Image (cartoon, rainbow, N blue to C red):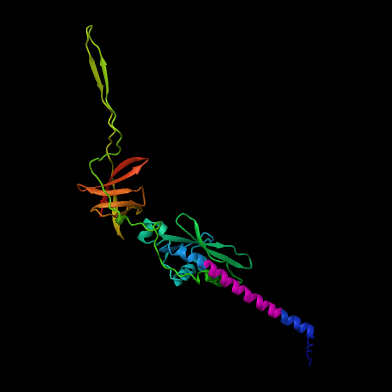
Amino acid sequence: MLRTAIMPLSNLELISYLGTIIDWEYNMKIKAILLVMVGVMAANSGSAQFNEYKYIIVPKKFDAYRKPNQHQTSTLVKYMLTQHGFNVVYDDALPPDVLTNRCLALMTDVEDTSSMFNTKLSILFKDCKSNEVFRTIEGTSRSKEFKEAYKEAIKMAFVSFDAINYTYKPSESTEVSPKDEPIKISFKDDVKTVEEEKKSKVIEQEATPENQTYKSVEPTPSNYTKAESSAAETLYAQPIENGFQLVDSTPEIRLILVKSSLENVFLVQGGPNGIVYQKEDTWWWEHMENGNKKLEQLNIKF
């Protein structure tokens, strides 16, 4: 029967081995401390920025991936944001106030810089003008299983939110309140375009050997055109918060109508700015186009 001999370590070898272990543990502690410090600093700078936004939108499919919710990225990001107190919605289920004002929400994105051996990603947040408002620290994982690797990386990235205390505080740039300012309208000029009236040209001419006078008054061309009518196309009014959305038969949202302080008068959003009002059982859409006032008849079914 063979017996295995165990050679004892010399004092120098033992000290070197223990030193390696201590250095490794020390480096891991320093790395963890730095990670938390970076997350706290990022959180302090991001709290005020997040407070301006009512919603955070998470896409069902991030641009970095080929399939919807690949590696459960969309599900995990939405879950982590919800855990930190944010009002999170998917990009295919937007609330009515976001449809009328996209600046109420931030859009999330994932920047994936993974390699063959490491999973690396950061979560980005952009406003309605695609400006980057906030970026998390880079989350990493060495796990060989994709599902577990992305779960670890996303959780590490969300260390940036540990010190964020989110409270929605609407600002003037993001909150739109059409009700606060009553509008004044007049129905006396139901025309497509109105231009300054031109003076008639009068020509005087002598017509007899003595002193005859001939006057010619040239008519001024009219600047008034009939209002355009789109009555052939029926738009269906679907109730939403504080108004209606008008959809066609496809169905596609054509206009968003927001209630005003006047009865049967709506502010238009989701298209050229203007108003929609009812006059003698007919609905009209008045707006500006290429610097001219344009009036269109609408066939609305409520």
Q: Is residue 207 left or right of residue 103?
A: left
Quadrant where the N terminus is found in the figure = bottom right
| Location of residue 223 in the rendering, given as x and y in whole percent from the top left corner | 29, 33
Q: Is residue 295 visible?
A: yes
Q: Is residue 45 left or right of residue 194?
A: right
Residue toward you, 150 or 206: 206
Q: Quadrant of residue 287?
A: top left
Q: Quadrant of residue 85?
A: bottom left
Residue shown at the point (46%, 64%) measured from the top left = 48
Residue 75 is inside the magenta segment: no
Tell me which segment is drawn in magenta. 20-42
Q: Is residue 244 visible?
A: no
Q: Is residue 104 left or right of residue 297?
A: right
Quadrant where the C terminus is found in the figure = bottom left
Q: Considering only vertical position in the picture, is 44 above or below 173?
A: below
For this orientation, the residue located farthest to the top is: 209
Q: Looking at the magenta stretch, what is its main secondary structure?
A: helix
| Location of residue 241 in the rendering, given as x and y in whole percent from the top left corner | 31, 60
For this orientation, the residue located farthest to the bottom is: 1
| Location of residue 109 in the rendering, given as x and y in whole percent from the top left corner | 50, 61
Q: Considering only vertical position in the picture, is 205 above or below 45?
A: above
